[in-house]
Image (tube, rainbow, N blue to C red):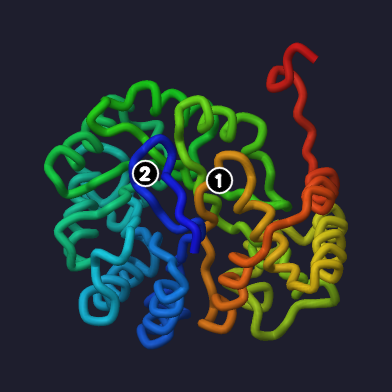
């Protein structure tokens, strides 16, 4: 798998990341092990989790697999903090105390002495940004964290945090929802990231599963859309606009002799500023389908057609002067 630098940092990662949100829940340890081995064997290195996933079980499962199954040094280990884990005073948020408490918890669950990429899961209006950034700086200078990034930040939030980050702990990444069905970040987040040298890590690059085409004629019984816990998550992208985009993706896939999944993933993977889409999978077979996208490079004509069918309105002040 091709490797890319994460933002302006020297951290080199695979151009696809393995997401582990369901590990320890819908995905048991045996299946997680199978996915991790398949991903690493394909040349993947970046594995993403969060302290909130499965109330910490995702980190525990991942940590249990590092060492004996896959060498720790073969993986770029990424996790997140900020989301509320407990009701205690340090159970969530972006205060110094909460963040450093979360960091210690993640290190324990992951069974490691350092995290390669530690990300703020969300912006916290209740905490002065300087305090939050000081916690990131301490995490890096203490050796517990190698690089830091953010997730789900608006354009102004990303730019403000990047400008205020100390030289010892610059922001190198931002994880955001980005796909042919969700292009809102093109307005301000993508330009802000480019200006500050921050790499994009798209989550839900397959439009929450809708871009695979599985929902074109209904809702498969074994899909997230049929699960009450995830139905709303999927329905967000089941619109008339989405149907037109999915049809365009399916047509492109037919012409290229590949799957809609591979086309949709290749499109977002090669967008300006994107380093690695974060792909989760129900099972190893589904992950193998995503890994197949590594072999796909979209012809310019198809890429242009997909750009057009998925285009969003971008006006003042993003396009000024016109």
Q: Toward the viewer: 267 or 309?
A: 267
- Mark 1 touches mark 2? (CB < 8 Å): no
User: Is 71 positioned to the left or the right of 248 in the image?
Assistant: left
Please report the residue visible at 87 percent of the width from the left and 65 percent of the height from the top. 251
Q: Toward the viewer: 251 or 203?
A: 251
Looking at this rendering, what residue extends furthest in the bottom direction?
30
Provide the secondary structure element on which disc 1 rests: loop
User: Is 31 positioned to the left or the right of 295 in the image?
Assistant: left
Is residue 181 visible in the rendered image? The answer is yes
Provide the secondary structure element on which disc 2 rests: strand
Q: Toward the viewer: 261 or 44?
A: 44
Q: Toward the viewer: 195 or 177?
A: 195
Label 2 crowding class (10 Å Cα cut-off): few <14, some 14-19, many 20+? Answer: many
Classify 217 as above or below 137.
below
Residue 226: give x, y in percent of width and height. 67, 78
Classify 127 as above or below 65.
above
Please report the residue visible at 68 percent of the width from the left and 58 percent of the height from the top. 297
Please report the residue visible at 38 percent of the width from the left and 87 percent of the height from the top. 30
Residue of label 2: 120
How far apart are the alpha carbons under marks 1 and 2? 18 Å
State which tag comes first along the sequence, 1 or 2.
2
Label 1 crowding class (10 Å Cα cut-off): few <14, some 14-19, many 20+? Answer: many
User: Is 11 positioned to the left or the right of 173 in the image?
Assistant: left
Classify 4 as above or below 192.
below
Residue 192: give x, y in percent of width and height. 53, 28
Please report the residue visible at 36 percent of the width from the left and 35 percent of the height from the top. 171
User: Is 95 positioned to the left or the right of 156 in the image?
Assistant: left
Residue 313: give x, y in percent of width and height. 79, 33
Residue of label 1: 274
Looking at the rendering, which quadrant does residue 58 occupy?
Answer: bottom left
Q: Nearer the viewer, mark 1 or mark 2?
A: 1
Label count reads 2
């Amino acid at each position: 798998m091709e490797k890319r630098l994460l933002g302006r940092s020297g951290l080199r990662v695979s151009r696809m990341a393995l997401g582990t949100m369901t590990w320890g829940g819908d995905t048991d340890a045996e299946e997680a092990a199978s996915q991790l081995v398949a991903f690493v064997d394909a040349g993947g290195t970046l594995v993403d989790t969060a302290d909130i996933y499965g109330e910490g079980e995702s980190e525990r499962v991942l940590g249990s697999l590092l060492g004996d199954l896959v060498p720790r040094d073969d993986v770029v280990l990424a996790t997140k903090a900020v989301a509320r884990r407990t009701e205690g005073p340090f159970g969530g948020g972006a205060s110094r105390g909460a963040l450093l408490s979360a960091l210690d918890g993640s290190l324990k669950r992951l069974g490691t002495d350092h995290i390669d990429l530690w990300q703020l899961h969300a912006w916290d209006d209740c905490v002065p940004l300087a305090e939050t950034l000081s916690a990131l700086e301490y995490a890096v200078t203490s050796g517990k964290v190698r690089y830091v990034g953010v997730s789900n930040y608006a354009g102004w939030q990303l730019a403000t945090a990047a400008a205020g980050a100390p030289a010892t702990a610059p922001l190198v990444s931002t994880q955001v929802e980005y796909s042919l069905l969700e292009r809102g970040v093109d307005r301000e987040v993508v330009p802000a990231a480019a200006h500050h040298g921050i790499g994009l890590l798209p989550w839900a690059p397959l439009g929450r599963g809708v871009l695979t085409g599985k929902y074109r004629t209904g809702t498969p019984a074994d899909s997230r859309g049929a699960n009450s816990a995830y139905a709303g998550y999927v329905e967000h992208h089941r619109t008339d606009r989405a149907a037109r985009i999915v049809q365009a993706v399916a047509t492109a896939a037919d012409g290229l002799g590949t799957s809609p999944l591979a086309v949709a993933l290749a499109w977002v993977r090669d967008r300006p500023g994107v380093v690695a889409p974060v792909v989760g999978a129900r099972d190893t077979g589904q992950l193998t389908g995503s890994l197949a996208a590594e072999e796909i490079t979209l012809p310019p004509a198809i890429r242009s057609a997909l750009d057009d069918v998925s285009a969003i309105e971008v006006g003042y002040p993003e396009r000024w002067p016109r």
